[in-house]
Image (cartoon, rainbow, N blue to C red):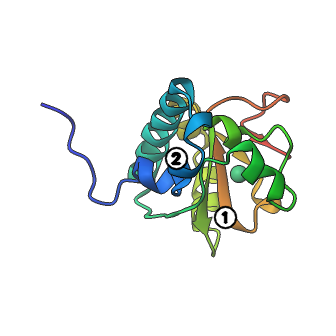
Amino acid sequence: MAARKSATALKLGDYYMGRDKLHRDELTSELRSNARETLRRVNRLLRRAGIMASVSSGWRPAAVNARVPGAAKGSRHILCLAIDLNDRDGTLDAWCMANLAVLEELGLWLEHPAATPGWCHLQTCPPRSGNRVFEP
Ligand SMILES: [Zn+2]
């Protein structure tokens, strides 16, 4: 029997933000696979934290990313390896900072909360520094 999914678990549709229709050609099977894995890890994190969060930025096709102010040119969002969650009061960022062992266990890396006011950026691949919590 499949594991019970939380009713509040984030879905692929939340992650693609409708861009899977507008930019279908760019959404390769590899990217779809990355997106599923990103959501799998992040949904586990949210269950562990007991926090409900919505997607503020999911997949960014390259053309979309180029229009996002301050977005890194090689952003992990382009490859479906990163997600931003709404975190207006910093609750999720604070939980992550206090539970870095859980991030390590799940294979998630966190952009430093000081750089992400109002949201929480998580990614499924290590940053260049290799640090669990990294500067953009
Ligand atoms: Zn991000």
Q: Is residue 18 left or right of residue 129?
A: left
Residue 45: x, y in percent?
A: 47, 46
Q: Is residue 76 left or right of residue 52?
A: right
Of tags 2 and 1, which is closer to the observer?
2
Residue position for label 1: 119
Q: Residue at the location (67% across, 64% down)? A: 119
Residue 69: x, y in percent?
A: 85, 62
Q: Hey, which residue is sitting farthest bottom in the picture?
A: 89
Residue position for label 2: 20
Vertical position of residue 52 compared to residue 42: above or below: below
Of the numbered discs 2 and 1, the one sitting upstream in the chain is 2
Q: Residue at the location (87% across, 58% down)? A: 70
Vertical position of residue 83 compared to residue 50: above or below: above
Q: Residue at the location (67% across, 48% down)? A: 60
Residue 51: x, y in percent?
A: 44, 62
Whether label 1 lies within 8 Å of ligand 1 gets the answer: yes
